[in-house]
């Protein structure tokens, strides 16, 4: 099909310069403390808390004598728990939680460190002042609000309602331990005759190992009071669910005809690798693109065939898209990608006493096809979610998926690939009565949709045609272009979580009875896909975010096939770059002028609905500038510092923009990179502790001198006597604004305004922010380089405007074109 998007994207990877970078200070103001009063109160509270430690110390013959204990420390909100750490003394901060105006930290104090800790308070209270006139240990003592005795709740960072009150309640606990204390935990579990999850069921991150242990609350408390191995406690809750409605099956006799019109792919093409219930390869529309040796299962005894129909339906959408269209025409079709399948879910109910950690299981699933065909590029696709578990913060499962994407899961090395993982945001509950209907925001996106590096997919709908006897007077629940009734949102996640989902694809609709009493899911409001029962039901209706996720994975594989030299980070960025909002979505944004209130809209719709044509190529009126490069965010030179930023000179067509004058144009910026996750310690309350590194972008503002722009975004560009950055107001034409970026590894915003206002706004800065590479890692880690993808889109509102040609002509020949793009697709 012909498309105006037939021109190669423009490569600007060489259009940047590197510069030394210095970030801003924290800017936090501290309340003035009265030294003597503050230190005296803290010492009294510390003595009382340690006295409780001694009283609660368990004298269990199965365990060696305790060598220390936990207390709870209340810090000013936003204070780093690192101020409490003294590695030489064995002082080790662990679980961190934010509560209203305070931050609570579990602190382990060895017995032989008590005097030294008390000496810190005494030195602060009455010791001589520093040459700057400040008390010693000010940065440690003044952020402390209180010391208290520790309880099991101190180390519990999961949903408070999920912590059992009954001392004899037995369940799987996720015990977080420091990397060097895994063997000690195993020894304690063995002494107490507790069942610890096998080593292949544990997740390993840079600082912690997560070990599932089956125990009662009383046994966990015994472990806490008798040892110092526990850093943090959560539920081992990985209980996956997916959504398959029992809908009326529809029969078709056109499968063979369609299969005959398809040019099937060879072996050396990208694949969509499904993590699901298996696939029935016998289907005529699947078999030529799914080899038997590309079918796997995480447990050999499960077999590789589909036991549920969900995996086969996912496969049909991931390979062909909605089959309604190709079955209804007679056009030839060419497939540029294949399928792979890993059965992730067991044929029967999972054993509730099996310490299944779906983080480690998913990592095992990712390794299987790579072992079979290491040379193949692939997109991993999973529509499995953790039933009833919100994704508001990193979990063991979402962190494991972030490791898969970053190429840092166990067994990976510096040569391991980065990987694109596509996830579902999760589905709402399929209520049947209208009076039970809740809005989509009442259903928070489910774990592991919060994975930073994954591309998370929600659902919208364009389906509004109701067909079927007895439903003539029924109406569609959602309007065309609106949020699908099946899709969850991340509105209730708060500001410290990434914006999820990023993209919206067709997820189907539901129908409402004339009396507004009943709600049903009808075949005509679903997509059409391949069925597991190839004899009786070869075609089945398919809907919800599973269908949307399969479509997104298909698009990612098509894009990978069209651009084999693009990184997974770039594929993700291009899909987001191609996304646009439907008219109902645009109307909601336009009606809300407060940027902060727009964040909730973004948490419903992400960045819009993607388009394969816009993602694959540019048009004269709508083009993409692309950069793929790496950066060294930090360096270790005596102290840990920021290292560099990148300044891009954007080849904006000044003459055309001046001629357009007040005509509206759009400039969209998407920055994509993969972080190495570190979910331990304070990562659940501080995004900068979770990410290995972070990046942000800043565009030169209207009328801003270039030198002032650099001084504003980079303290290293300022005169040493200048303490403050030069101020230059922005024009407030961004859709979301910089405050919308607090977490995640994909950042996107769109500037819309008069073309003439873009004149002079041709410099973009990519700069680092904090991450655990800088704060807690060895020198070899601090000095690492990290790669990122940048996509800058310039779009006119009229198709007869040529923005593309003057940009290409302004770039040195040979820089602009990376790939030949077919004029027709």
Image (cartoon, helix red, strand yellow):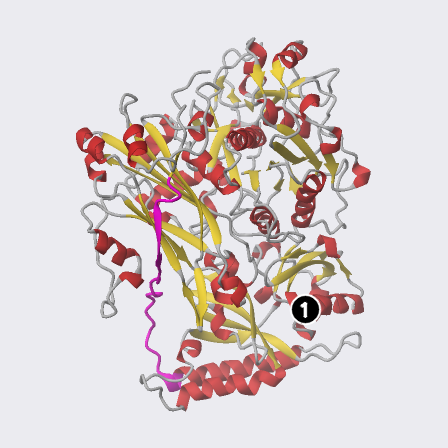
* Foreground residue among 339 and 521: 339
Residue visible at 47% across and 75% down in the picture: 146
In magenta segment, residue 22 = yes
Q: State the residue position of label 1.
A: 181
**Residue 468 appears in the picture as rendered:** no
Q: Is residue 566 above or below residue 154?
A: above
Which of the 4 image quarters holds residue 68?
Answer: bottom right
Classified by dominant secondary structure, the portion drawn in magenta counts as: loop
* Foreground residue among 642 and 545: 642
Which of the 4 image quarters holds residue 273?
Answer: top right
Residue 390 at x, y percent in the picture: 55, 46
Residue 644 at x, y percent in the picture: 38, 58
Residues rendered magenta in the picture = 12-37
Residue 63 at x, y percent in the picture: 76, 75
Label 1: few (<14), some or many (≥20) within 10 Å?
Answer: some
Residue visible at 30% across and 22% down in the picture: 799
Label 1's element?
A: helix
In magenta segment, residue 382 = no
Q: Is residue 422 above or below residue 167?
A: above
Could you tell whether 806 is left or right of 768 in the image?
A: left
Residue 185 at x, y percent in the picture: 71, 67
**Residue 452 appears in the picture as rendered:** yes
* Foreground residue among 428 and 290: 290
Residue visible at 75% across and 78% down in the picture: 64
Could you tell whether 627 is left or right of 163 in the image?
A: left
């Amino acid at each position: 099909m012909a498309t105006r998007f037939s021109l190669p994207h423009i490569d600007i990877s060489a259009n940047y310069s590197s510069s030394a970078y210095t970030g801003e200070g924290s800017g936090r103001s501290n309340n003035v403390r009265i030294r003597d009063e503050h230190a005296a109160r803290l010492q009294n509270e510390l003595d009382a808390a340690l006295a409780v430690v001694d009283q609660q110390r368990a004298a269990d013959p199965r365990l060696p004598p305790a060598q220390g204990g936990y207390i709870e420390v209340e810090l000013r909100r936003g204070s780093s728990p690192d101020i409490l750490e003294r590695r030489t003394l064995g002082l080790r901060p662990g679980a961190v939680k934010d509560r209203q105006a305070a931050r609570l930290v579990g602190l382990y104090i060895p017995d032989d460190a008590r005097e030294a800790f008390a000496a810190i308070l005494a030195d602060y209270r009455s010791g001589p002042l520093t040459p700057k006139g400040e008390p010693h240990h000010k940065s440690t003592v003044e952020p402390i609000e209180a010391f208290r005795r520790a309880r099991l709740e101190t180390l519990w960072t999961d949903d408070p309602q999920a912590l059992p009150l009954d001392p004899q309640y037995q369940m799987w606990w996720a015990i977080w331990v420091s990397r060097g204390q895994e063997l000690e935990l195993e020894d304690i579990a063995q002494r107490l005759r507790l069942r610890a999850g096998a080593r292949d069921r544990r997740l390993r991150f840079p600082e912690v190992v997560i070990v599932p242990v089956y125990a009662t609350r009383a046994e966990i408390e015994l472990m806490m009071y008798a040892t110092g191995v526990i850093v943090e406690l959560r539920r081992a809750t990985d209980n996956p669910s997916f959504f398959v409605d029992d809908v009326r099956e529809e029969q078709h006799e056109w499968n063979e005809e369609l299969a005959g019109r398809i040019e099937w792919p060879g072996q050396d093409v990208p694949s969509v690798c499904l993590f699901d219930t298996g696939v029935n390869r016998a289907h005529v529309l699947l078999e030529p693109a799914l080899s038997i040796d590309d079918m796997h299962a995480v447990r050999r005894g499960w077999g590789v065939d589909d036991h549920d129909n969900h995996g086969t339906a996912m496969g049909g959408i991931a390979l062909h898209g909605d089959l309604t269209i190709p079955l209804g025409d007679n056009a030839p079709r060419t497939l540029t990608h294949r399928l792979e399948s890993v059965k992730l879910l067991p044929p029967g109910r999972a054993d509730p006493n099996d310490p299944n950690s779906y983080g480690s299981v998913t990592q095992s699933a990712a390794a299987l096809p790579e072992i079979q065909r290491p040379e193949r590029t692939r997109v991993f696709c999973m529509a499995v979610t953790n039933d009833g578990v919100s994704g508001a913060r990193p979990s063991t499962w979402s962190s494991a998926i972030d490791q898969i994407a970053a190429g840092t899961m166990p067994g990976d090395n510096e040569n391991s690939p980065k990987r694109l993982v596509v996830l579902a945001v999760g589905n709402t509950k399929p209520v049947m009565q209208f009076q039970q209907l809740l809005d989509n925001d009442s259903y928070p996106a489910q774990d592991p949709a919060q994975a930073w590096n994954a591309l998370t997919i929600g659902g919208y709908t364009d389906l509004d045609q109701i067909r079927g006897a007895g439903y003539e007077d029924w109406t569609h629940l959602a309007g065309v272009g609106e949020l699908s009734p099946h899709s969850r949102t991340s509105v209730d996640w708060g500001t410290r979580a990434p914006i999820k989902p990023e993209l919206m694809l067709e997820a189907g609709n539901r129908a409402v009875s004339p009396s507004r009493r009943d709600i049903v899911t009808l075949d005509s409001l679903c997509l059409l896909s391949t069925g597991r029962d190839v004899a009786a039901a070869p075609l089945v209706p398919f809907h919800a975010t599973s269908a949307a996720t399969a479509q997104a994975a298909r698009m990612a594989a098509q894009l990978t096939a069209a651009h084999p030299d693009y990184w997974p980070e770039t594929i993700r960025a291009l899909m987001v770059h191609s996304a646009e909002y439907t008219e109902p979505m645009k109307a909601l944004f336009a009606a809300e002028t407060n940027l902060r209130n727009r964040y909730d809209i973004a948490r419903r719709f992400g960045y819009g609905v993607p388009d394969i044509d816009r993602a694959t190529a540019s048009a004269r009126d709508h083009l993409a500038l692309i950069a793929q490069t790496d950066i060294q965010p930090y360096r270790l030179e005596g102290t840990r510092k920021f290292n560099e930023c990148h300044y891009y000179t954007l080849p904006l067509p000044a003459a055309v923009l001046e001629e357009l004058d007040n005509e509206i144009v759009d400039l969209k910026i998407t920055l994509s990179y993969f972080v190495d996750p570190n979910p331990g310690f304070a990562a659940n309350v501080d995004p900068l502790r979770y990410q290995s590194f972070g990046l942000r972008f800043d565009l030169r503002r209207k009328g801003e001198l270039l030198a002032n722009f650099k001084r504003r975004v980079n303290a290293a560009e300022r005169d040493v006597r200048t303490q403050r950055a030069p101020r230059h107001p922005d024009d407030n034409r961004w859709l979301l604004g910089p405050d919308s970026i607090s977490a995640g590894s994909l950042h996107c915003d769109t500037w819309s305004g008069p073309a003439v206002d873009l004149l002079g706004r041709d410099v973009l800065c990519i700069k680092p922010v904090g991450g655990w590479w800088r704060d807690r890692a060895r020198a070899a880690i601090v000095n690492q380089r990290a790669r990122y993808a940048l996509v800058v889109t310039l779009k006119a509102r009229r198709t007869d405007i040529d923005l593309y040609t003057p940009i290409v002509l302004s770039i040195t020949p040979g820089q602009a074109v990376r790939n030949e793009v077919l004029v027709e697709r």
